[in-house]
Image (spheres, grey):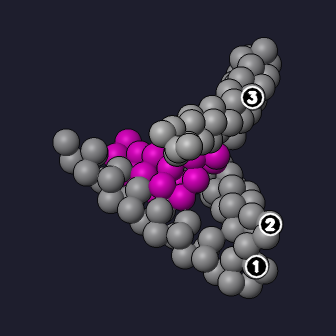
Amino acid sequence: MATFLWVIFGGAIGTGARFGLSGWAAHRWGETFPWGTIIINITGCFIISLFAGLTGPDGRWIVNTTGRQFFLVGICGGYTTFSSYSFQTLTLARDGEWLLAAGNVIGSNISCLIAVWLGFFLANLINNSGRA
């Protein structure tokens, strides 16, 4: 139960950081292009891999399982799930699971784009139902 609460707490920190950085980028460069999302995804990918590498079995820092989950799942997951997706894909590739890594990239991107399209399609159907 304690690990669960630590992950929730880390998620709140990551979500707050994402909200703040995204707002700053929108204020700085405008909202026409999603600069904030790109910055968050890139920095999240860098941060999750740096921390995972430094605290993994061959890393220089010893961090217990709860601490790793607090940071990797909580903070990084709240900051951007793209970092988890990218790190998991890299792990598959590093383990020689090239087909699974490619399947994760292709499957995630195509499936997510289809899901977004279906969500908007369904929302439009609901919004327009009963209108003359």
Separation of marks 3 and 1 at Cα, in angstroms: 28 Å
* Quadrant of the snapshot with the N terminus: top left
Look at label 3 and name its amino acid: Ile
Residue 23 at what x, y percent from top left?
Answer: 60, 77
Look at label 2 and name its amino acid: Phe
Given contact means CB atoms under 8 Å apart, are the residues at marks 3 and 1 in contact?
A: no
Residue 118 at what x, y percent from top left?
Answer: 63, 32
Label 3: which secondary element: helix
Q: Which residues are magenta?
A: 64-85
Specify the farthest residue to the front: 132
Q: Which residue is mark 1?
A: 30
Residue 95 at what x, y percent from top left?
Answer: 71, 22
Label 2: which secondary element: loop
Q: Which residue is mark 2?
A: 33
The residue that appears at 35% across and 50% down in the rendered structure is 7
Residue 119 visible, this angle: no
| N-terminal label among 3 and 1 | 1
Separation of marks 2 and 1 at Cα, in angstroms: 7 Å
Q: Which residue is mark 3?
A: 110
Is 84 one of the magenta-colored residues? yes
